[in-house]
Amino acid sequence: MCSESRNRLLSRAVEHLAGHGVGGLSLRGLAADIGTSHRMLIYHFGSMEGLLVEVVRHVEERQRAVLTTLTRDPVASPADAIRAMWHHLADPTLWPLERLFFELYGQALQGRPGTAPLLDGVVESWLDLNVDLAGRWGVPAEVARTHARLGLAVIRGLLLDLLATGDRAGTDAAVEAFAAAYQDGLPVPTRAPAGPDSGPDD
């Protein structure tokens, strides 16, 4: 029950922050907006920072699920997956949560109390997923991890660019250039993703 209550509050917080952002936000105000008390939020999350870290982690988990879904298309290429994921991430409805991600990321790097847990897996979780997905196209694991790190840096950097400048056309063009260059530079011929349950002879 405690876990269910925590998850419900987290989902409400994500929905509220996606629609309203975090400007001028207080724990008491957020609690009132999502139909609970600040004591309940402190009980489940420890602090405002703890709650916001969990919000970001939840959103990141959802984005990884989106990427996994996008790569299930049997005709998609790695470049197509990059383009589709960027199209998803660049949606203005996600900008408040993406701004929150970068804000908390910076605070965690500065050592602000309560934010350090964000750094756990903030890179590695994406690398592990992308290495697995790249393997479906026959990319060797020893190069896939380097590619995954580069791709993560490029997409996060361009997302920060988009949030700062609003230049959708310019960032779209940069993503297209990266996707095409990645596809051309693969060390082995690509193939359609086999899917997570397919064996080598499927």
Image: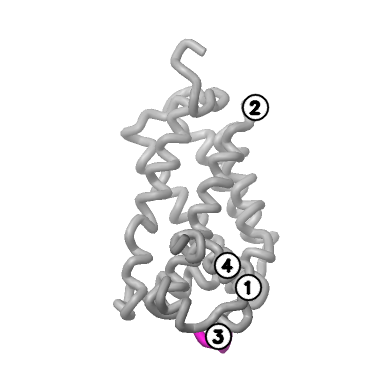
Residue of label 4: 14
| Cα gap from disc 4 to disc 3, whole angstroms | 13 Å
Separation of marks 2 and 3 at Cα, in angstroms: 44 Å
SS class, disc 1: helix
The residue to which callout 1 is attached is 16
Q: Residue 101's spot in the image, x, y percent?
A: 49, 68
Sooner in the amino-acid sequence: mark 1 or mark 2: 1
Residue under the image location 60 percent in, 48 percent down: 85
Position of 49 relative to 161 (above/below): below
Label disc, if present, on residue 76 of the rendered structure: none
In the image, what residue type sits under mark 3? Leu
**Crowding near the residue tagged with mark 1, few <14, some 14–19, many ≥20 C-alpha atoms within 10 Å:** some
Q: Position of residue 3 (x, y in %)?
A: 45, 60
Q: Is residue 186 visible?
A: yes
**Disc 3 crowd, CA 10 A, few/some/many (<14, 14-19, 20+):** few
Between disc 1 and disc 2, the foreground one is 1
Is residue 171 placed above or below 68 in the rendered structure? below
Which residue does the image show at 37% across and 29% down from the upper left? 140
Marks 1 and 4 in Cβ contact (< 8 Å): yes
For the record, the magenta segment spans 23-29
Q: Nearer the viewer, residue 1 or 141?
A: 1
Q: Which mark is residue 25?
A: 3
Amino acid on which the number 1 mark rests in the picture? His
Tell me which amino acid carries mark 2.
Val
Disc tally is 4
Return the x and y of residue 98 as percentages of the image width and height: 55, 67
Amino acid marked by disc 4:
Val
Q: CA distance from mark 1 to mark 4?
A: 5 Å
Mark 4 packing: few (<14 Cα in 10 Å), some, or many (20+)?
Answer: many
Distance from Cα at disc 1 to Cα at disc 2: 37 Å
Q: Position of residue 29 (x, y in %)?
A: 57, 87
